[in-house]
Amino acid sequence: MMLPGTRAHLSTTSLIGLAILSLAGASPASAQTEPAAEDAGTNSGDIVVTAERRSQNLQDVPASITAFDGNSLRDLRVTQVSDLSRLTPGLAVRVSGSTSDPQFTVRGIGMNNSETNQNPAVTTYLDEIALPSNAMLGVQLFDLERVEVLKGPQGTFYGRNTTGGAVNLITKRPTRELSVDARVDAGSLALREIEVGIGGPITSTLSARVAANSYQRHGWQDLIVSGPRHGDFGTRNGDLDRQAFRASLLWEPGTVFNALLVGDYSTTNDDAMAYQHTGNLKKDGSRTFCGYVATGIRDEANCGSYAIPRTGPGGTPVSGVQIFSDLQDDPRTAYASFVYGNQNDVDTGGVSLKMNADFGPVILTSVTGYRKYKRISTADDGSPYVLSDNYRDQRMSVFQQELRAGSGEGWGALSWIAGMYYTRDTNDDFVLFDQSDQFAYSAEFVSTYRQVTESLAAFAQVDYALTDQLTLTAGGRYTGERKEFSYDGSVIGSGAFPVPVQGYDNHINADRGTWRVSLKYEPSADLNLYANVSTGFKGGGFPGTIAFSVGQLTPFAPETITAYEGGVKAALFDRTVRLNTAFYYYDWKDFQATTQVNVSGVPLVILGTAGDARIYGVEGDISWYPVPSLMLRGGFNWNDAKIKNGRYDGQIPPNTPDISATGFARWEPKNLFGALTPYAQADVSYTSATFVALANAPTVKEPKAFFANARIGLKHDNGIEIAGWVRNLTDKLYRTSILGSGSASLPARATFNDPRTWGVSLGYHF
């Protein structure tokens, strides 16, 4: 059965022309000088953030935040949200299988589930509009002003689904002066990337900005053998083709009122990557599990990967099964049938409107947003047989409205913000799950569900300066939520097979209050000591997987968290050193996680409540400018997490390394060669061994990982820049997702990160 999705490709000709015009048409006399190393460096303490719904210096906020400005994001080649994990200690990002949906975990708080009806524990916001599903994050990042990673529950301003934290993506706003950002990259795997952003005034009160990005690249995985019925010999997997466009208008009729309208659209036409299997069956045909090699991918001497029907002459089935083994242990090669074709096609877009009215004592703000998402994707089990291939058609939409009022002039030692928030999300999912070559039965399962979520909340926060140096903050939020869920399944095939649930309807309601209390002490302008206690709430829900019994669709309870944190933010030695340290303890109740169980011989991924956990740790970040032309930065997170009760008592929550660390160095001697400034930079990241699922088994343990990247370049005062870069210098491949099958008939399998890539970049900025 072949159901390929429609592939719509946007021509890049207009982008190429726009880039050439930008490079050739701007006047060098008007070009602005590129920021100095301190401004261009990553996570400068002078970055202004809006994590608490107002502009603040990063060093003044009494909370753990990692922020990156647009220059840093460009130089570090942050093109996907998953790239943030190699720059942020305590942040782990796993991608889910062939669709590459990122799953955030902050300091051990996250959720290892990729179903689109599941809300993450770390929610991402695009210009203050919440993206309620991880699937909405698998698009290209471009033309960003900055990114903010907020660590710990954000129950007051961000509300539900931020028990672990939040990620803010802030796009570049229109400017009152003409500005141009243009960049062309080319490199290995036939990389072709073009990004252009142009902004400036239209009238005396109206400004605009348009930006576009085109990203195309070949895949690196070879399909070395086709299946018995489908596929072509020598096919390449993993090609990427992504186009994105954004336009914004800023209206400022006076000093009292302004409005920002932003619209965006992106399309993704990628090829899926085939899974690599890890070997889990004894080759003697007993259909029993064999041991695993702790340091390798599989034990080919004793273990196979797939149980398939045994056939006699002419393909006639006979009793028993045969074990198939993959003799290629190189992740760059794959066996796959791709019975539904090979695709991961996404169309998504949205519009947002932010209005501010400053009446002096009171500032009013309205944020309205609407987004839609459509994806057609396929996944192969990584074998030449059809054991667990699937095809999915997923649709989502979200509407959000927030109204808030805040203090302006004349409040003295008191500042406050209060508001109301409403959101409505819809999610429709259709999946075909093909097990035609499964040894127990041959069948194709159909699963559909629809989920509608509505949430209403009220929130407020008050800051009061007890003295010139001591500030007390108290805030709270009350949230009500309703989820309606309907499910229907069917089966196509013959033989003894389970029948999916049909005609299931249910709903759940939840309401919860969350709060935060913080005390900040600033004995000087360069020292911030703080302590806070905060709570978070994440609503319950329904498993979105295929179900063969009503029990598998039982709704799970909300999760809650109480977090304690103390920290120090200091600028030392004439502000050439910035040192930020935080200590934290989390009490995580009824946390939600994915486990795998067997139902009638079929391995199923079930989401539910996994128990309680306690987490504590310490985190640090230091940046040092030994000379004006050199920046050094390092960060670390040490984390101890344990589940305290239930089936997984004593185990570690998924995606929670004990240690994660980052390092960064940039040398940029200003005008070393007259108008020319060379620069060189490198960044590294390390994570200790990590279990990516429950239960903590060898099949789902990822060994320690180390990544290194580098960039060298030359900038001219007129804004032209040329650079060369390398990512994954060591060319190491690590598993980015692992499915540890609980079945003797289906394989444990995994996907991997990109190998070493390189490229050159030509840019112009003024």
Image (cartoon, rainbow, N blue to C red):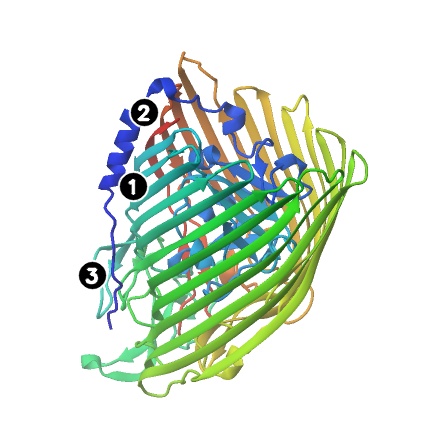
- Residue topped by disc 1: 191
Which of these two is toward me, 744 or 424? 424
Q: Is residue 407 above or below residue 298?
A: above
Within 10 Å of disc 1 (Cα), the crowding (few <14, some 14-19, many 20+) is some
* Residue 711 x %, y %: 41, 30
Frontmost of labels 1 and 3 is 1
Give how far apart the Cα atoms at labels 1 and 3 are: 24 Å
Front-lying residue, 744 or 546: 546
- Residue 232: assigned label: 3
Q: Count up the numbered dots.
A: 3
Report, in whole angstroms, how far the alpha carbon at label 1 lies from the one at label 2.
27 Å
In the rendered image, the vertical position of residue 240 relative to residue 436, given as above or below: above
Q: Position of residue 658 (x, y in %)?
A: 61, 50
Secondary structure of residue under mark 3: loop
Disc 2 and disc 3: Cα gap in Å? 49 Å
Q: Mark 2 sits on what residue?
A: 26
Type of amino acid at the residue the image marks with label 2 = Ala
